[in-house]
Image: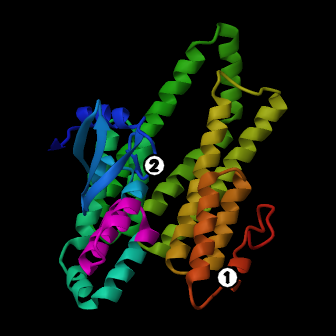
C-alpha cells in the first residue's frame, strides 16, 4: 500500500505507528507535535516516504516536508540523500525557508565545495531570495488568519532580519503593522474584561492602580514602537540601535511597574500582572536577541555576545537567550579569525557565568 496522505489520515497513521518498537527506526516528528517511529524508504527535497506495520499490514505513505518538524526533516534528508551539489543546495533553501540559517549556510557551503559553478548559477537565478521570503510570508499570513499572532510575528521577523532587501519584506512590514494593531486591541479587550469581573470596590482599586501604572504602560508602548521600528528599518545599523533601545525601554517599563506593584503591596490584579510581567520580559529578551542577530550576521561576536548577556540579565532562565548565546559561541569558534579564543571573549560573564561553558 503506497499513497500520498492527507492531513486527517496522516494524523491517524502517525498515532498508529507511534507505538511500534523503536529498534532500527527513525523518529518522525510532525509540526503539530505528533511523534512516532518508522522506516525511511526514500527522501526527496520536499518529502519523505516511510513504512510501518499496522494490524499486520505493511503501510507506506509519503509525508510532505511542510508537515514534518524542520529539524527532523533536515536530519533525515541529510542522512539519506545522495551527496550532490543540487541536493545540498535544495536542503539549504529548505533550511532558509524554515529559519535554520546556520544549517542553510552550511549546506550552501557544502554544495559549493562539490560544484561551485552549479551554486553560482543557482544563486544568480532572479527572485531566489524573493521566493524564499514569499514562502515565509505566506506562512505568516496563514498564522495571522488563524489568530496565532505571536507565531506570525516570528515568521515576519525572519524575513525582516534575513531577507529585508526583498520586495516581500515590504508586505511583511505592512502585515506587522496590522498584527501590532490587533495585539493592542486584544490587550485592551482583556484589560476591560478583567476589570469588569471585579465588584464595584475592586474596580475602583483597579482603576486607581492602572493610573499609577500609566508611566510604565507608556514606556511599554514606546518600547513596542521601537521594536517595530527595528523590524521595519532597512538599515541594519539603525535596526540594531532601535532593537537595543527597545530592550532598554522594556526594562524601564518593568522597573516602573514593579516599583508600583511593590509599593501597593499587590501581587496580582485581576490575574493580569504575572502574565504581563512575563510578557514584557519576553519582549525585552526578544529585542536584545534581534539586535544581537544583526551583529552575529556581521561576525561581530563580542557585540553579539553582549546582547545575549543583556537578554539573560533580563531573564536568566530564558531558553531563547541561552540558545542565542550558544549560537554566538559556536560562530565565534568556527570563525578562523577568532578561533577558540572567541568563545572566552563572548562567554556568559554578564549572567553569572565565567567565560567558556
Whether 96 is among the magenta residues is: yes
Q: Position of residue 97 (x, y in %)?
A: 33, 62
Q: Which residues are magenta?
A: 74-103
Q: Position of residue 32 (x, y in %)?
A: 39, 40
- The disc, 2 or 1, on the residue closer to the chain's N-terminal end is 2
> Separation of disc 2 and disc 1 at Cα?
41 Å
Whether 249 is among the magenta residues is: no
Q: Position of residue 125 (x, y in %)?
A: 18, 78
- Which SS class for mark 1? helix
Quarter of the image that includes the C terminus: bottom right
Q: Main secondary structure of the magenta part?
A: helix
Nearer to us of marks 2 and 1 is: 2
Q: Mark number for residue 23?
A: 2
Residue assigned mark 1: 342
Tell which of 323 and 204 is nearer to you: 323
Q: Is residue 96 above or below residue 251?
A: below
Amino acid at each position: 500500500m503506497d499513497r500520498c496522505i492527507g492531513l486527517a489520515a496522516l494524523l491517524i497513521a502517525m498515532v498508529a505507528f507511534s507505538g511500534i518498537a523503536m529498534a532500527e527506526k527513525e523518529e518522525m516528528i510532525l509540526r503539530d507535535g505528533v511523534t512516532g517511529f518508522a522506516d525511511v524508504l526514500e527522501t526527496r527535497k520536499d518529502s519523505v516516504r516511510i513504512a510501518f506495520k499496522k494490524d499486520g499490514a505493511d503501510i507506506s505513505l509519503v509525508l510532505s516536508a511542510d508537515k514534518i518538524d524542520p529539524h527532523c526533516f533536515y536530519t533525515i534528508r541529510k542522512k539519506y540523500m545522495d551527496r550532490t551539489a543540487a541536493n545540498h543546495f535544495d536542503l539549504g533553501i529548505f533550511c532558509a525557508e524554515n529559519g535554520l540559517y546556520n544549517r542553510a549556510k552550511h549546506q550552501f557551503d557544502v554544495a559549493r565545495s562539490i560544484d561551485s559553478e552549479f551554486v553560482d548559477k543557482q544563486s544568480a537565478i532572479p527572485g531566489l531570495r524573493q521566493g524564499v521570503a514569499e514562502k515565509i510570508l505566506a506562512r505568516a499570513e496563514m498564522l495571522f488568519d488563524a489568530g496565532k499572532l505571536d507565531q506570525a510575528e516570528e515568521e515576519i521577523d525572519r524575513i525582516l532580519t534575513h531577507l529585508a532587501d526583498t520586495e516581500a519584506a515590504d508586505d511583511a512590514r505592512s502585515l506587522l503593522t496590522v498584527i501590532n494593531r490587533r495585539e493592542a486591541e486584544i490587550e485592551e479587550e482583556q484589560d476591560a474584561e478583567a476589570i469588569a469581573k471585579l465588584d464595584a470596590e475592586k474596580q475602583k482599586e483597579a482603576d486607581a492602580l492602572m493610573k499609577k501604572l500609566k508611566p510604565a504602560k507608556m514606556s511599554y508602548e514606546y518600547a513596542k514602537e521601537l521594536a517595530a521600528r527595528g523590524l521595519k528599518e532597512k538599515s541594519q545599523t539603525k535596526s540594531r540601535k532601535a532593537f537595543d533601545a527597545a530592550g532598554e525601554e522594556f526594562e524601564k517599563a518593568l522597573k516602573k511597574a514593579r516599583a508600583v506593584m511593590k509599593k501597593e503591596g499587590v501581587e496580582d490584579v485581576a490575574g493580569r500582572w504575572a502574565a504581563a510581567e512575563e510578557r514584557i520580559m519576553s519582549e525585552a529578551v526578544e529585542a536584545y536577541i534581534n539586535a544581537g542577530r544583526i551583529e552575529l550576521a556581521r561576525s561581530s561576536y563580542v557585540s553579539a555576545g553582549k546582547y545575549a548577556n543583556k537578554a539573560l540579565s533580563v531573564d536568566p532562565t530564558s531558553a531563547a537567550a541561552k540558545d542565542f548565546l550558544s549560537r554566538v559561541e559556536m560562530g565565534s569558534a568556527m570563525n578562523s579569525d577568532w578561533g577558540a579564543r572567541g568563545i572566552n571573549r563572548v562567554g556568559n560573564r554578564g549572567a553569572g557565568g565565567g567565560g567558556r561553558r
